Amino acid sequence: MSDYNFAYLDEQTKRMIRRAILKGLAIPGYQVPFASREMPMPYGWGTGGVQVSAAVLTPDDTFKVIDQGADDTTNAVSIRRFFQKTADVAVTEATAEASVIQTRHRIPEEQMNAGQILVYQVPIPEPLRFLEPSEVETRKMHALEEYGLMHVKLYEDISQHGAIATAYAYPVKVEDRYVMDPSPIPKFDNPKLSMPAIQLFGAGREQRIYALPPFTKVVSLDFDDYPFEATKADHACDLCGSTESYLDELIVDDAGGRMFMCSDTDYCTSRRKAGHIGAQGVPYEEDAA
Amino acid sequence: MTPLLQVENIAKLYGARIGCTDVSFDLYPGEVMGIVGESGSGKSTLLNCLAGHLVPDRGAVKFDTRADGQHDGGLRDTVTMSEPERRMLSRTDWAFVHQHARDGLRMNVSAGGNVGERLMAVNARHYGEIRDTATDWLGRVEIAADRIDDRPTAFSGGMQQRLQIARNLVTGPRLVFMDEPTGGLDVSVQARLLDLLRGLVREMGLSAIIVTHDLAVVRLLADRLMVMKDGQVVETGLTDQVLDDPQHAYTQLLVSSVLQV
């Protein structure tokens, strides 16, 4: 433990990041530039989220990491171990027990509560990027609230696919002011963005931090005649039988066999522990791998 | 009658070199003004200063703005107004047609999206209505309705230029800036484009400022003409008057240089 400062980053760096976070919380949806540090993992693995987590973690925190909803994927396991090693914090897989949750591409199914912090890993924080390549121009568009271009993207979706086909990283307007990329969460999760917990977004490579304070007004952009719809696979979880949760589709053999299961592993496991069984599920057993 | 645009002593310097200097004129509603001159005479610099793309070093560009919540409207200097207001003007009351269509179009967005962008920028939020307007405008610039979902990259040069015009006129601007609208097009396509532009300008009662080095274009479109040389205006007058009876030596040279077929 003595080899590292608490949570890897030095105190001055954490202070700088906390300043960016506070500014982000004061201006919901505004992308605050910060001096992103080189982290001992490649860009794209959550270097932004890791720096934000390092800046908000305290020794008393309980930490949880999810990647596409799962606690047991490489990305989640390596980031969790990173903070176990460098911060010696308690870790958990249970959403309700965690005080800080770092997430990639999902919001936990279970209701988040006041006092919790949700940290997102963000690959590209600029929602206008693919329509307007110039950063100078996009900053000006944010400053002057010129967001017509965002609807051009949705228009293109409808004209090509007959419906708004954007299924993840669905643009939202925050407090009637800033248009924000909610990171690549499925649009199923968009209605949950207004929640009692604090949400922090960190983009390491792009050097931006933005934030949503509790109960911020977050509206998904849409057209009057093509309203926003939070979609999910029209199926129930094959393991726990939930019809409420966001599902992953798995190909299970080479004969077209497939199953749907909750992407949030903690949610699915706790339902199975409580005795819910899906179409292809078996009763939950401790340590059944 | 109030002029729509009042230009007073506009000057733009590039260091010691002169871009354009001491340009003043009034433009009245429904009037089309042509600006001609050789390459490097300051035509485009002047146009960019008027349209707010460049900040002039001296002078005022007063536009007859509509009344809104904060201002009474009337003639206001667009050089000193705030940037949000100027940008709002440039997507409502003003339009700018670039010489190269790809400068004025979004090449990775479909034709319908290109036309709809200005509508969405002024808060149109009904897909069906945006699409109907886009289809209508494509028809008015003679682009087949079934090309609405094609990208401009799939269009010919003349079609791209017509699409750019549709995209600019869809919000019903009152003043259109055109920078060599027929440049790079072959003569038959040019003729059709000019015909179309003349029709639209008359029908919508637009005012326009057209920069070109092609005297045939101004002969067809412009009511009044301004001849520029070395950043200065050397002659102004009614188009036919200037072209048929040029007074200044340079204008005489310009008119006599036109190739006769």
Image (spheres, coloured by chain):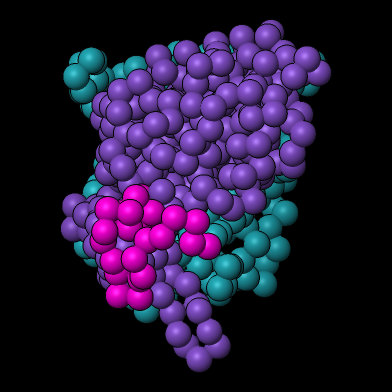
Question: B215 or B118, which is in the foreground?
Answer: B118
Chain letter matching colour purple? A
Q: Residue at x 50, y 67 (%)?
A: B151
Tell me where residue B19 appears, x and y as whole percent: 69, 26
Where, by quadrant of the figure, is residue B249 drawn? Answer: top right
* Residue A162 versus residue A17 in the image, above or below: below
Taking the magenta stretch, the answer to whether it contains residue B194 is no
Query: In the image, is residue A247 above or below residue A77?
Result: below
Chain B shade: cyan
Q: Is residue B193 above or below residue B225?
A: below
Q: Residue A229: x, y in percent? A: 25, 56
Q: Nearer the viewer, residue A174 or B174?
A: A174
Residue at horizontal 50%, vertical 77%?
A: A251
What type of secondary structure mainly makes up the magenta span? loop
Query: Residue B212 location in percent, x, y?
Result: 59, 48
- The residue segment tinted magenta is A267-289
State the image coordinates of residue A57 (x, y, percent, origin top left): 55, 20
Left or right of B129, for residue B19? right
Residue B153 lies in quadrant: bottom right
Q: Is residue B70 visible?
A: yes
On the question of residue B77 being in view, the answer is: no
